[in-house]
Amino acid sequence: MSIDFSDKMAGETDKQLQILVIMAHPADTFDHCGGTMAHHIQRGDKVTVVGMYQGVHIHDEVIADQMRMSGTTLSDEESEKLRDTREDVKNKEVIEACGILGITDVRFMGIEDKINLINETTIIAIAKIIREIKPDILITHYPVIMQGFDAHGQAGEMVLRAAGYAGNLDFSDPNPGHRTPQILYSNPDNYLAKGSVLHSESNCYCDLFIDVSDVADKITKARNAMVSQQYNGNYARKSVEGNIGKMGDAMGTGYAEAFVRHKPELRYYLPLPKRMEAWANEPEKEQLERRGYMVAPYVDLD
Ligand SMILES: [Zn+2]
């Protein structure tokens, strides 16, 4: 048997990509990779985002902030009603935020955010979504944030396990098995700073950055839409500048979203992006002007 190398494994796929983003909380669906998704939608690719949890115990101005301070006992019925009401508010904001970035297929699993340890029921439910959407690229949280302690990391682990299970048949799912060619993890928080001793042992290394300088204003406006968790106003500006701006600065540009590739890439030739080639020997002044590009603090958010 001979192996056909006539295409030299050349280039990138030219099919319309289906990207699936599955994240822990509603705003996580766009605030780690929304600029990157905006690029793909502009190119004509398909993007589906899924929030796993209601996200009302974390980041909700009523439950997670006001009521946390006062303490309240509610019956199961009353608490469910309140959670559902706040969930609706948040989900509407997420749909608006995603709309700013061009993302229209926005889904919510509606799981109450409590402790959310890794569990089979959620993994099987995620696997069904993967079999239905059939992503070419799946994006989720890095599974070992804080050495596996963090809820986002645990969500990422469930998505990773679900991606494995989705490749096989589930007799309760009418869709055939689907094996996702590539999985990307969004930038784990511990890449930016060590927030606790559990962050200290990370060996994570972001190895893929997408330059989102051209859509940094949209990213800021999307964050500003999350009024229920008080991200609007200056925090929207600051968080985009402080996170995505820092990533851009590290990569020699204005704004960048960072990813970790789950699988190494198999190629025929070594890759060299044209920009990396050009930027390697440019005058420092040009490089610093590009890195100094700053739009988030000045975005009109009215
Ligand atoms: Zn979150």
Image: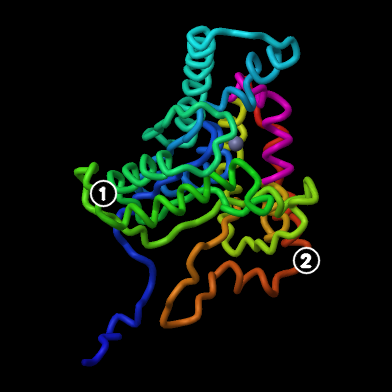
Query: What secondary structure do most residues of the magenta stretch adopt?
Result: helix
Q: Amino acid at mark 2?
A: Glu
Vertical order, 26 against 197 (above or below): above
Ligand 1's image quarter is: top right
At 47% from the left and 29% from the top, the residue drawn is: 111
Q: Which mark is residue 61?
A: none
Looking at the image, is mark 1 or mark 2 earlier in the sequence?
1
Residue at x 75%, y 51% (from the top left corner): 198
Say what amino acid the circle numbered 1 marks.
Asp
Question: Element under label 2?
Answer: helix
Image quarter of residue 25: top right
The C terminus appears in which quarter of the rendering? top right
Magenta residue span: 226-243
Q: Is residue 89 magenta?
A: no
Q: Position of residue 61 (x, y in %)?
A: 66, 17
Front in this rendered view, residue 1 or 164: 164
Image quadrant where residue 165 sits: bottom left
Q: Where, quadrant-wise, is the N terminus in this rendering? A: bottom left
Establish if 158 lies above or below 276.
above
Q: How is the image coloured?
A: rainbow
Please tell me whether residue 192 is drawn above or below residue 92 in the rendered image.
below
Which residue occupies 72% across, 50% down? 246
Q: Residue 235: x, y in percent? A: 72, 29
Report crowding for label 1: few under 14, some 14 to 19, many 20 or more residues within 10 A (C-alpha).
some
In this rendering, position of residue 66 left or right of residue 15: right
Q: Which residue is mark 2?
A: 284
Residue 132 shown left or right of residue 32 in the figure: left
Q: Position of residue 194 (x, y in %)?
A: 78, 51
| Numbered disc in front, either 1 or 2 | 1
Q: Which residue is mark 1?
A: 170
Q: Residue at x 61, y 20 (%)?
A: 227
Mark 2 neighbour density, 10 Å: few (under 14) some (14–19) many (20 or more): few
